[in-house]
Amino acid sequence: MKILKFGGSCLGTDDALKRVTRVVKNEEEDSIVTVSAASGVTNSLKEFVSAPRSEREIDDFLLKLKLRHIDLLPKRDGENRKEALEMIEKKITKLDRLLYGVMYTEELTPRTYDLILSAGERLAAVVVSARLSHAKLDAAAMETDALGLVTNNEHFNAVAILSECEKNLRPTLQSAVERGIVPVVTGFFGITKNGHVSTFGRSGTDYTASVIAYSLKTGPIEIWKEVDGFLSADPKMVKSAFLIDRLSYEEAAELAYFGAQVLHPRAVQPARQRGIDMVIKNLYDLKSPGTWIGTSKATRKDVIKSVSYVPKVATLKIYDTGAGYKSGFLSDISTCLTNEGINLFSATTSQTCVAIIIDEGDAAAARKAMKTHIAGVGESFEIESGRALVCAVGEGLGRTKGVAARVFKAVASKNVNVELISAGASTVAYHFTVDQKDLKKTVREIHKEFFGYV
Ligand code: ASP
Ligand code: MG
């Protein structure tokens, strides 16, 4: 049985939805569909919810949202359309109450925020299910909070509790499919054990697809998007960047984590645990083979596969003469930063210093957190902004002599100073920081070293 995931760019227009319908209809295997919000909807919810200023604004906002979704429904009158209209109306009413609540209380908790954000996927599931039903498939919209896709309590970046998901999702989805139904499941969110909606972070629907596949022990997972798949580099920097046809789970996970915006950073993990293949597919170019992700069948181990990057990061360095051996030193620092909602990209330690890479946008918050805590956790600290993180990925890096050397020689040949290096934590990736102004040069030179052109 296949899991078909459709991203927002596959759901925003009548043409896109026709293509989606065709893909699902032409699928010979049984399938479960999972959907993101239609393109732009999550962004607009995010933007609006942080500042609903008046009743009038809320009404206008919701009217637009409603009409946009109604516009995406099958045009012809009939049972499907009527049912879908009612469902959309209900979801908009709930959203209306939530937004009024936020405006009057002037308070937005992580729970409420996640609940509001989840509306985009709920609306999209109604639309897609109506479209499929209209095309004579027996489709049904299903919501992951009701299905019991259980997560931990980390709002905006929740992690699924896979054993619970398996227990809850399997019976319902399996029996629906056995009855000939195509479930159209909301992506992007689940529910905490206390019953609160929790979202997975941007592009979270990739992760939903993987959790469903894990829970039903089935695959492959097809991730439908508006691009072909993973490339050898960002085409904005390297014009000749080309499609990568195969990646191991580890390679895909590292690339997704370090900047390639093709896949949710955690999406690989549940699939990998079950050995389920994932394929990135382009809805607008069905002939493109896409990128296949699965158990490593790497053909060549003497090259890297791709170079990715995260721009605008900062390095936080905490000095302490005992940094290397003080137990709990690193965990105290990371707890302190995590409590402030700061995401840690990577950490390296020496005997006298712990260096942590964070988003540049979090530098001020990190400075504040460190100032409050430094007495407890270290002797002094500094933050260096204006850095970029570069990541070279390929199975060969940890296994073949000379591959890493070629990466760094290429960088050095451009007179770029490599600052913090992390190697060895992953056998398939090396990452390091450079000055932000050297980022493009660095990415291009690495690409040239391995592929001969940029
Ligand atoms: N709608 C969410 C987002 O835009 C989740 C997703 O697209 O997968 O990030
Ligand atoms: Mg989206």
Image: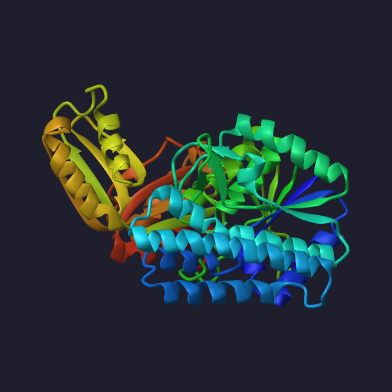
363 is higher (above) or lower (below) than 299: below
Residue 24 image position (x, y, % from top left): 80, 60
Q: Horizontal placement of 43 versus 274: left or right? A: left
Scheme by which the image is coloured: rainbow
Q: How many labels does the image show?
A: 0
| Image quadrant in which the N terminus is located | top right
Judge whether residue 88 can be spotted in this image.
Answer: yes
Residue 301 location in percent, x, y?
Answer: 58, 43
Identity of the residue drawn at 84% across and 48% down? 30
- In terms of depth relative to the viewer, which is nearer, 111 or 237? 111
Camera-side residue: 320 or 423? 320
Q: Position of residue 279 (x, y in %)?
A: 69, 52
**Figure check: 48 above or below 197:** below
Residue at image coords 64%, 53%:
186
Q: Is residue 406 left or right of residue 122?
A: left
Does residue 287 appear in this view?
Answer: no
Residue 325 coordinates in the image, percent (x, y): 23, 22
Q: In this view, does 291 lie above or below 89?
A: above
Front one among 46 and 284:
46
Who's the residue at 14% across and 37% down the image?
374
Task: Name the quadrant where ligand 1 sits.
Answer: bottom right
- Residue drawn at point x = 35 percent, y = 44 percent: 344
Query: 79 and 373: which one is in front?
Result: 79
Query: Picture quarter containing residue 105?
Result: bottom left
